[in-house]
Amino acid sequence: MNVLTAIDSFKGSLSAKELSDAIEEGVRKVYPDAIIKKVPIADGGEGTFETLVNGLKGETITLEVHGPLMEKRLARYGLLEDGTAIIEMAESSGLPLVPENKQNPKVTTTYGVGDMIKDAMKKGATKFIIGIGGSATNDAGIGMLASLGYEFLDSNNRPLKPVGENLIHIHTIDDKNRLSALDSCEFLIACDVDNPFFGLNGAAYIYGPQKGAKKEDVLALDEGLKHFAKIIFEYNGIDVSHVEGAGAAGGLGGGFMAFLNGTLKPGIDIVFEKVHLENYIKDSDIIFTGEGKIDYQTVMSKAPIGVAKLGKKYNKTVIGLGGMVTTDAESAYDKGLSAMFSIIHEPLTLEEAMDKTKTYDNTRRTTQQIMQLIKSIKESA
């Protein structure tokens, strides 16, 4: 019996690695001699750097960076043996880092993302995988770029603070202090949205309100992004105006494209390629995947569905586990999931359901029950 665990974290409870360990215990209760491969996965958002660093035996780096409000704080990123840095922008510039009463994308910055890139370059990194979900910002990446040596000047040639409300005031881009090491770097950006840089479906309109922007702020930020797109085109001839994904993370996707030659790609594709998931799936009999809540959003190409599609390609049995499985997730069967199970076996409060020890035990127990059923079917066949 060859079993693969390719599961995402249960956010706020267990990591992908912890869940993989629980599944392994459940499998071995029924098949002690099973060959089990554990490949924790993520979709490019929260937990991606931990998943890749743990799965590929990399190193976790902790450093002091500038936070969303330019305060000093600690952030982490991963460094792999092949010189690839794994960075989550939310570690330095994420919305949860800003107190609710101070959330305002007009004044937040991605400066800390640049701090992490700079540190990784000093440690020899030349390839970067960057997850850009969960941002508190709408600065189009000028904060990150300022940390890397760019200056953004107003019409009087004065440096501007690299925050969203100043995009409208940018007149000139000065790159004389840009770090030359950037020329040798490749940036692969995990981006799972297709929003353009500005406009009704752009960064400010769609995501600004979630980050604390009022109606008038959204209008001002959108005008700033539109103006900055024009400045970028004048600077280097790159037009980010209507590029799908350029509006991700408050325009950070466009900033990476325009200044660092970044390539935007779905997060699950990046992760799956990096961990060589397809090769593991080919050699497996049973595959366990899942995430905290399996619902209609899961079906819209979240990580477990990526696993299911690969499983379907090779006619494999793919089992989904979740803290909750909703009725609107049933179309996941058409994508390749063979079955879905909630690990909750009794009425629980949310706090109880999120408890790490209980989640681990429930995952182990559910897996054991599933494997017992599989064994029974095989023996009676």
Image (cartoon, rainbow, N blue to C red):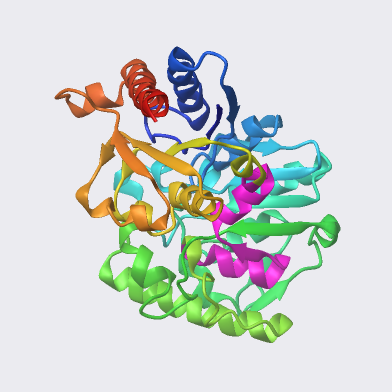
Q: How many marks?
A: 0
User: Is 124 on the left or on the right of 35, as rendered?
Assistant: right
Q: Quadrant of the image for the C terminus?
A: top left
Q: Residue furthest front?
A: 381
Residue 319 pos. (x, y %): 40, 39
Instruction: Magenta stretch: give its range.
Output: 250-278
Residue 251 lies in the magenta stretch: yes
Confirm whether residue 211 shows in the render.
no
User: In the rendered image, which quarter contains the N terminus?
Assistant: top right
Residue 198 shown left or right of residue 132 in the figure? left
Q: Which of 18/264 is in front? A: 18
Q: Is residue 155 part of the magenta span, yes or no?
A: no
For image coordinates 69% across by 74% down, the residue present is: 173
Image quadrant where residue 205 sits: bottom left
Front residue of this view, candidates 328 and 158: 328
Q: Is residue 61 above or below residue 150?
A: above
Predominant secondary structure in magenta? helix
Q: Is residue 232 visible?
A: yes
Residue at image x 48%, y 76%? 196
Percent across and percent down for residue 351 are: 23, 25
Q: Is residue 301 above or below residue 198?
A: above
Q: Is residue 45 above or below residue 235?
A: above
Residue 281 in the image: state x and y as whole percent: 59, 43
Find residue 223 and report its image quarter.
Answer: bottom left
* Residue visible at 46% across and 42% down in the picture: 317
| Image position, residue 242 (x, y; %) | 52, 82
Please name whichever residue, 178 or 82, is drawn nearer the observer in this view of the structure. Answer: 82
Horizontal placement of 258 versus 88: left or right? right
**Residue pictured at 66% horizontal, 72% vertical:** 258
Q: Nearer the viewer, residue 73 or 36?
A: 36
Compared with residue 236, is residue 76 higher up or lower down, i.e. above or below? above
